[in-house]
Amino acid sequence: QLEGAIVNVERQVNEQQVAVEVQVARLQVECDGLRRRAEVLGGMREEILQAMDEKVAVCREPLSSAKEDRSGVLLKRCDELDARLASQKVHVEAHEQRFSSFAERLEGLQQEVFDLLHQGAQKRREELLAEVDGQMRVLRERMDTLSELMDELMLRQASSD
């Protein structure tokens, strides 16, 4: 019975440890996904900025064969494009900063959760071990009582013979 109780306690501790490891692994997968998304957005940011710079450069090229009115309109469009490009840069940087901040917070929370789960599992393990120790003491007392009863029985039997 004692060995069964110990095996049961070890099984419960192992189950809790596996559950903790599964939760930690899930959080790590989520962190990795967020990192990949941030990397993809970073790559897209560079592509967008490069394309916008190319369009601005094309708009600013001197137009020798066009009329002055046309060049004025194009310059105005280039200025508008510059303004939109600056606005897009600000938006992209803001999103990049948010993702970075979110990833940092998620990693911090992941560590806190892991620590709390580890502490909970350790506390539960200690409680179970204390319970097993109590049960072992009770069993020892019962075994001592049985031993005393057996000795007494043997003495009675020996004296009756």
Image (tube, helix red, strand yellow):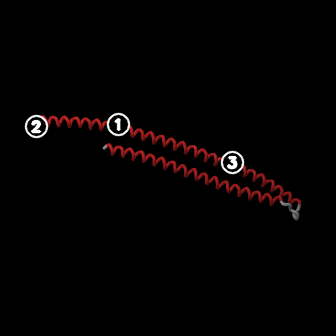
Choose mark 2 or mark 3, whichever is in front: 2
Residue 55 locus on image (x, y percent): 77, 59
Q: Residues within 10 Å of mark 1 (few under 14, many from 20)?
A: few
Residue 5 locus on image (x, y percent): 34, 43
Q: Residues within 10 Å of mark 2 (few under 14, many from 20)?
A: few
Residue 51 locus on image (x, y percent): 74, 59
Residue 85 locus on image (x, y percent): 75, 53
Please name the residue shown 19% across and 34% down the image.
Answer: 152
Q: Earlier in the sequence, mark 2 or mark 3?
A: 3
Residue placed furthest toward the left: 161
Please tell me whether mark 3 sits on a helix, a strand or a loop. Answer: helix
Most foreground residue, 89 or 9: 9
In the image: residue 118, left or right of residue 104: left
Q: Earlier in the sequence, mark 1 or mark 3?
A: 3
Please name the residue that numbered disc 2 is placed on: 161
Q: Which mark is residue 134?
A: 1
Residues at marks 1 and 3, CA–CA distance in whole angstroms: 59 Å
Residue 67, by quadrant, is bottom right
Rendered position, 126 above or below 39: above
Choose mark 2 or mark 1, whichever is in front: 2
In the image: residue 149, left or right of residue 73: left
Determine whether label 2 and label 3 are within 8 Å by CB. Answer: no
- Give, as a three-letter code, the residue at label 1: Gly
Please name the residue shown 58% across and 46% down the image.
Answer: 107
Please name the residue that numbered disc 3 is placed on: 94
Residues at marks 2 and 1, CA–CA distance in whole angstroms: 40 Å
Count of numbered circles on the image: 3
Q: Residues within 10 Å of mark 3 (few under 14, many from 20)?
A: few
